[in-house]
Image (tube, coloured by chain):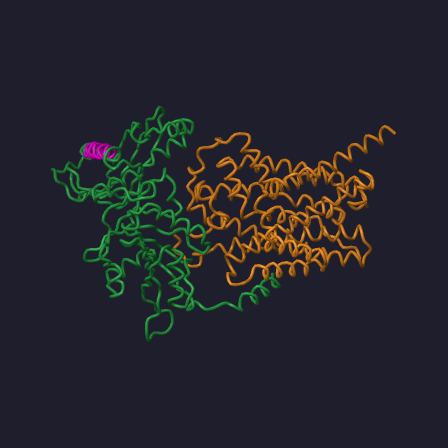
Amino acid sequence: MNDTITYKQFKCIFTLAFLALNFLTYASRLTNACLTDGILPILITSVIAYAGACAIIKVMLSHKGMDFRQILTLLWGKVFGNIVFGIFVLNLFHFSWYAIRLLSEQIGVCMLRNVSVVMIELILILTVLFIGIKRLRTLGNLSQILIWYAGINLLLLLLLTSKAAEIKNMLPLFTSGLPEYTRGVLVTSSYLFSAVLALPFFIPKVEGIYGKNKVIYKDMLIIFAAVFAVYCAFYVMCISVLGTEFTIDYVFPALRIVQSDNSHNAFFERFEIMLLSSVIVMHIMYFSVTLRSVKTAAESVFNEKNAKIAFFLSPVIVFAVVLFFKNQAIGKIIFQSVDASNITAPHALLPFIVYIGYLLKKRKMKNE
Amino acid sequence: MTVISFLFSIAGSSQSGTLNDLNLVNVVILSQKEDGTLKMDMIVNEKKDGTEGTSFKYAVLTTEGKSIAQCVSLAEIQTGKDVFFGHLKSVIFELSFLKQEGNITAFTEYAKRNSCINHYVTLFALDDKDEKLTKSIKEEDDKTTNFFNSVVKKYPLEGIYTVKFNQMVNSLGTFCMPLLSVEESIGFNGVCIMKDDTYKDRLDRQDTKFFKILTGEANNVYIKAPEGDIHIHRCISKLKYRGEDAFSFNIKLSCEIEAYKNPIDLTDNGEKKTEEELSKFFTAQMEQFIKKIKYKYEADIADIGGCLKRYDNDRYRQMTQSGADILKMSDVDVKVDVNIIRNEVFK
């Protein structure tokens, strides 16, 4: 049976996935890099990511009926194609690991203080595996419901927190130099739109997507603009409510701003649970998207039986990596001494590498 | 979502407890003894004896230690319950705590590390050497209980300039807290000025009123003027940077004259004249108060440095790098515009 999703579901899945990763921490790191000018790096990142998404969509739509690995082999040859493919999959693994680690720590700190973080990670992995063994359509249906849940929650939170906002905290503007903006772009480009890497794995499974290039580019622009607006709104709100000093100091500034201020209503006294539940939803969707991409990648490399084994092993690998980094001294040293954003930031260039291959191939064919 | 909820509830329920297993802290009072030991009084909800349902009274948990973290863990050991700061409403610092350098930083650092602490707390300074406050809480004094009700249950604290935890580090390390003192019972007694992490000075009651006007917090404040007793209903204050180290405060006061001292002129011209006279009076008072800020208190409680930083960052950097005193070098101009919205005879 053909496992497909509708175009609408595809949009919902990726909107949630773009919003998910690093949602809680980006404001802190971005403010540290370029104080109140963070909107500019978010804008640059969004534009780069949008261009990357359009490039990879163009390549995929130009090769109807082929999966991503076949396209890469066609464009770059067997060896280099597989290397590029491997880098895509490794990045997806990395982001899965980062997402699961971040979310588990957040849940552990804010909700289940007495429960081991490893236990929380295990629960999240089991949940995603459960979604993973279901049809892709199930993920699509789930995303159509959850996008409303997350969207309304985020909107409500912004409205409620706007009471405590002091917009003059955003001043002075444009005080950072080019190096700070570059660091800001590195911070944001690493994670904000990392789900772009999963796009080529999903496109062949979307019903009726071929031949609608202009519509897709337009819809993608709307999605990226909406995601950009949400990130900017929370960034501005973090600084407006907390000031730059406290935004830098807090690891999870978004959670701090959604705590109540002068609320006379007991129901809203600690409404960060609303943000947390939305973040859980978005992270689960992100994690499902990355692992589903890994599953698709496994299916294109192995036969059906081995692909299933590889898919079930992949969360185990993620879990083992998480455990290793958490418990082994060497893992801690690596994690602390290396800024992950600087290593993984080049992933934003991967779609462009694929696109360059596509252009070269096209030119070669034209010459022939 | 069902699967996640189910799994999390299984994981969480194994070690979960009821609300009775938590010390729900409403207010924290921090003080320091002469030997340097920190004393922490946590005002918690305690169930009234012999009652059913949610009938609570205030109880005090007192611990001493070298750090805030140690005081909290001692309280947990003493009571056998976790201390929960998620519903914290207010933190009260005794002057002995504020006068010691580094104590406020230690508190903010502890709060930043503790993710479950409510960071929208209202801060107060307290002048209470004899520890009368904790005694009166223990004795269930009505006035003290009412005060804590007003803080904890958030009855409107109109006209009181309060500082929140998330504002503490702004304004070049200078901020103010309402000062409480305990005589017969607890009450407000001016404002405490904090500068560079330590107690700097205190404003008396009259200066506190001017401070509220300067910061736009003087809603429902009573001031005696030559024209009569003035009840300020609404106050708006805007600080603007005019360039070349010059600043101006534009203050608008909506007042009610409650007791005229001069013959009343009820015509429009008469009211206009009174408004002009009041404007002159307030302008003179505010200019005098700004001089006091500059030369007596020597603390930027009006946030002039912050204003310069926001509107002319290059100049601000230049001045801070050269070690110049922004407050003293600034030329501050005040314009007060009084609008009589009501008087005792008509309107």
A251, A56: nearer the viewer = A251
Q: Position of residue B336 (x, y in %)?
A: 26, 33
Q: Quadrant of residue A212?
A: top right
Tint of chain A: orange
> Which residue is at the front of the view, B283 or A335?
A335
Does the magenta-highlighted stretch encompass residue A39? no
Q: Residue at x 53, y 42 (%)?
A: A29
Q: Residue at x 23, y 60 (%)?
A: B143
The answer to whether residue A90 is left or right of residue B337 is: right
Q: Position of residue A256 (x, y in %)?
A: 46, 50
In the rendered image of this protein, does residue A236 appear above or below residue B37? Answer: above
- Residue B290 magenta: yes
Identify the residue shown where x is 33% and y is 33%.
B304
Q: Quadrant of the C terminus of chain A?
A: top right
Quarter of the image where one finds residue B136: bottom left
What segment carries the magenta color? B274-291
